[in-house]
Image (cartoon, coloured by chain):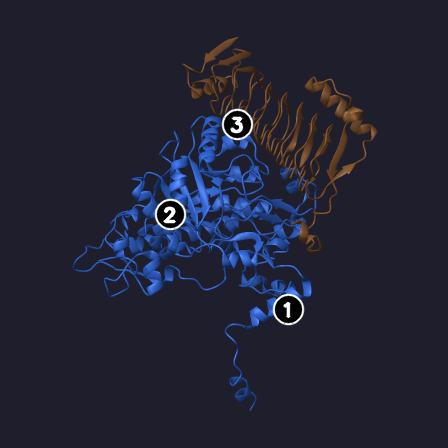
């Protein structure tokens, strides 16, 4: 009887249980929800795209005999020393402070094993990270925490960060509980206070100023290393054009599924555009300027498997970056810590309170005891394995489409499962020639 | 003394010559003539050398300076001595906005006025301005000292952390969490030393000290109107 009664219950789509819980939480506390991770709402994504494998009209490549190149050169527009990555999957910027030193080291180790790059974050460069990263991209952020010219000159590339997909137009907040002596010292701030990261750079405004700023960084580094510009995906077509004009060697576009260490939930879920929608805008901008493949495009935000990698490449990206997926590979949200996740009000697979510094997996924490749980060597190998799988999967799909280089994948290899994804990715709805918004 | 005429040589050539002094210092004194507002002059220096810029400099002059002493015999554009680590930068004329932005150390002296956001997000530098500073100066300033012998514009020290601010003249308004503080003996001593280093003949007791009320150090909803 009770089951029948339950079946008759109808949950509101508008006021579902999570929504009502958030209303109660807001009423209890009077403060908005700050959390980590990326957008959790369902968005049009790469799952809505499919590859058209070769058959009569296209010629496939043998899976285990014919090579499919995965290496990419990044930053050969102006830099004397561009970066060559062996797989087009890079590790996105994540800060020491948000992550433990062991986690940063593990990211460096994993990336180096497979010959790709990792990236610093807000808070500067740690010796562990530099030491374990064969290719390290140094982020130049609005807060300039830990920013110094010596580290700038140690970097293999410099990424000027204008925004990130989780919070385009927003700054950051590293809560006091994660500000240990070491983090405080690196950021020139008192221990234990909440640290605000600015949303705008302090010494330039607008694209014309940015061009001069990039010139300054090039002068300081004697034009040796590539300069990236990272933007959160919003008005991507225009932003990419301005970034090219400002002198970027590489442009990083981070879609709204991209993760964060700590941002307001309302920001994560309601600002920006999906990664899939951003890529065609970026590629169009580059193509119109005659700069596609000359200024490389790195795409991030919600990339989970080799199919996502291959789809990004087919839409015109030169490489991708992963953040959340890399943390999961290290051990974030691992079910083996489920009891401990539950003890802090979460559960394995749901944990997103990176800002609290209580991560049972020892990744998004500065607690020395929790941090010890992550062995950087073991975790680094896990990440390397995962990166290898992404690469092999992407190669598998490229060969099926007859491509001997991941960058030979093209939009013509793709179709869309939904009208929305067809419109956003600018590829035909499967079984049709219809690309919404485009004239025949 | 080695002279580069920037009407003939490029800023790139000049900077490279200055950078080459890091490994082997062959010349202590350098002069750039005809800068004519060029950007990025003498950026990224890391050697015990002196550089005279004979004229007006554009953006980011002496940016990220370490050890070196750079003097601009004219006005300086946006972001002079930004992110300086050590050494001395002196502007004989006026400086545009964001002078000394995010600088970690060293001494920045501006003999004229400074524009908006002087010392924005400063992280340990000492800045001494003979004239006035514009609005939002020392915004999110973290550490170091800002001395203003003239007046300060609106919202001085907004969202301030631990910078010591000394102003002799008037302050149009204070930013969020910035308050007037007592001048104790140690502050008089600190200010006296800074004025002496800058070469300004001013009475330290005529200055007022401003600093952080430290009410915004932890995020509290009760402070919502300040955010």
Please name whichever residue, B219 or A338, is drawn nearer the observer in this view of the structure.
Answer: B219
- Lower position in the chain sequence, tag 1 or tag 2: 1
Residue A237 badge: 2
Residue at coordinates 56% horizontally, 26% vertically from top-left? Answer: B80
Tell me the quadrant of the picture where the N terminus of chain A can be found: bottom right
Q: Chain of mark 3?
A: B
Residue at coordinates 24% horizontally, 57% vertically from top-left? Answer: A439
Residue density around tag 3, few if under 14, some if 14–19, many if 20 or more, within 10 Å: many
Residue position for label 1: A24
Cα separation, mark 3 vs mark 2, equals: 29 Å
Q: Is residue B17 above or below residue A142?
A: above
Residue position for label 3: B60
Residue A63 shows up from this direction = no
Q: Position of residue A119 (x, y in %)?
A: 49, 42
The picture's colour for chain A is blue
Disc 3 + disc 1, Cβ < 8 Å: no
Cα separation, mark 1 vs mark 2, equals: 40 Å
Please name whichever residue, B87 or B153, is drawn nearer the observer in this view of the structure.
Answer: B153
Asked where in the image residue A308 lies, by quadrant, the reply is: bottom left
Q: As drawn, which residue projects farthest toward the left? A: A56
The brown-tinted chain is B
Q: Chain of mark 2?
A: A
Q: Chain of mark 1?
A: A
Q: Position of residue B208 (x, y in %)?
A: 77, 31
Q: How many marks?
A: 3
Q: Position of residue A122 (x, y in %)?
A: 56, 43
**Kind of element beneath mark 3:** loop
Q: Position of residue A329 (x, y in %)?
A: 48, 55
């Amino acid at each position: 009887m009770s089951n029948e009664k339950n079946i008759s219950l109808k949950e509101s789509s508008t006021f579902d249980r999570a929504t009502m819980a958030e209303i109660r939480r807001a009423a209890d506390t009077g403060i908005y929800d700050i959390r980590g991770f990326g957008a959790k709402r369902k968005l049009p994504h790469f799952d809505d795209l499919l590859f058209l494998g070769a058959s009569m009209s296209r010629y496939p490549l043998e899976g285990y005999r014919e090579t499919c190149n995965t290496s990419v050169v990044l930053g050969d527009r102006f830099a004397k020393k561009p970066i060559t990555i062996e797989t087009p999957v890079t590790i996105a910027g994540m800060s020491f402070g948000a992550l433990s030193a062991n986690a940063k080291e593990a990211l460096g180790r994993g990336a180096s094993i497979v010959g790709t790059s990792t990236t610093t974050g807000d808070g500067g460069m740690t010796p562990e990270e530099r030491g374990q990263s064969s290719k390290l991209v140094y982020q130049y952020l609005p807060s300039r925490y830990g920013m110094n010219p010596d580290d700038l000159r140690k970097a293999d590339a410099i990424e000027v960060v204008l925004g990130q997909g989780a919070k385009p137009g927003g700054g950051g907040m590293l809560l006091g509980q994660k500000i240990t002596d070491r983090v405080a010292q690196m950021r020139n701030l008192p221990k234990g206070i909440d640290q605000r990261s600015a949303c705008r750079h302090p010494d330039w405004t607008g694209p014309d100023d940015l061009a001069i700023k990039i010139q300054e960084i090039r002068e300081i580094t004697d034009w040796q290393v590539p300069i990236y510009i990272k933007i959160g995906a919003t008005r991507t077509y225009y932003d990419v054009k301005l970034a090219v004009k400002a002198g970027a060697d590489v442009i990083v576009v981070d879609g709204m599924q991209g993760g964060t260490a700590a941002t307001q939930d309302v920001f994560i879920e309601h600002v920006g555009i999906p990664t899939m929608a951003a890529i065609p805008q970026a590629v169009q901008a580059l193509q119109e300027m005659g700069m596609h493949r000359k200024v490389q495009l790195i795409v991030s935000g919600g990339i989970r498997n080799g199919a996502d990698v291959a789809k990004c490449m087919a839409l015109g990206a030169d490489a991708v970056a992963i953040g959340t997926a890399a943390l999961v590979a290290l051990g974030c949200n691992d079910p083996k810590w489920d009891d401990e996740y539950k003890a802090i009000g979460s559960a394995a697979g749901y944990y997103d309170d990176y800002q609290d510094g209580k991560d049972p997996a020892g990744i998004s924490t500065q607690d020395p005891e929790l941090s010890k749980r992550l062995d950087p060597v073991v975790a680094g190998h896990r990440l390397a394995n995962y990166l290898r799988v992404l690469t092999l999967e992407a190669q598998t799909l490229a060969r099926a489409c007859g491509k001997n280089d991941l960058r030979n994948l093209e939009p013509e290899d793709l179709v869309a499962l939904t009208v929305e994804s067809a419109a956003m990715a600018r590829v035909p709805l499967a079984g049709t020639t219809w690309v919404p918004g485009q004239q025949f | 003394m080695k002279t580069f005429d920037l009407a003939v040589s490029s800023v790139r050539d000049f900077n490279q010559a200055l950078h080459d002094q890091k490994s082997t210092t062959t010349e202590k004194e350098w002069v750039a003539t005809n800068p004519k507002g060029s950007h990025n002059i003498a950026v990224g220096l890391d050697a015990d050398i002196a550089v005279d810029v004979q004229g007006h400099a554009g953006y980011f002059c002496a940016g990220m300076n370490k050890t070196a002493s750079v003097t601009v015999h004219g006005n300086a554009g946006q972001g002079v001595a930004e992110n300086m680590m050590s050494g001395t930068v002196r502007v004989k004329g006026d400086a545009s906005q964001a002078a000394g932005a995010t600088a970690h150390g060293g001494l920045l002296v501006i003999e004229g006025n400074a524009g908006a956001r002087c010392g924005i997000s400063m992280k340990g530098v000492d800045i001494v301005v003979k004239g006035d500073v514009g609005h939002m100066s020392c915004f999110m300033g973290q550490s170091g000292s800002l001395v203003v012998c003239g007046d300060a514009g609106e919202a001085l020290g907004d969202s301030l952390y631990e910078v010591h601010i000394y102003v002799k003249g008037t302050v149009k308004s204070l930013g969020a969490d910035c308050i007037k503080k007592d001048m104790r003996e140690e502050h008089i001593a600190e200010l006296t030393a800074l004025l002496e280093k800058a070469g300004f003949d001013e009475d330290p007791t005529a200055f007022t000290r401003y600093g952080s009320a430290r009410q915004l150090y932890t995020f509290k909803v009760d402070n919502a109107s300040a955010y």
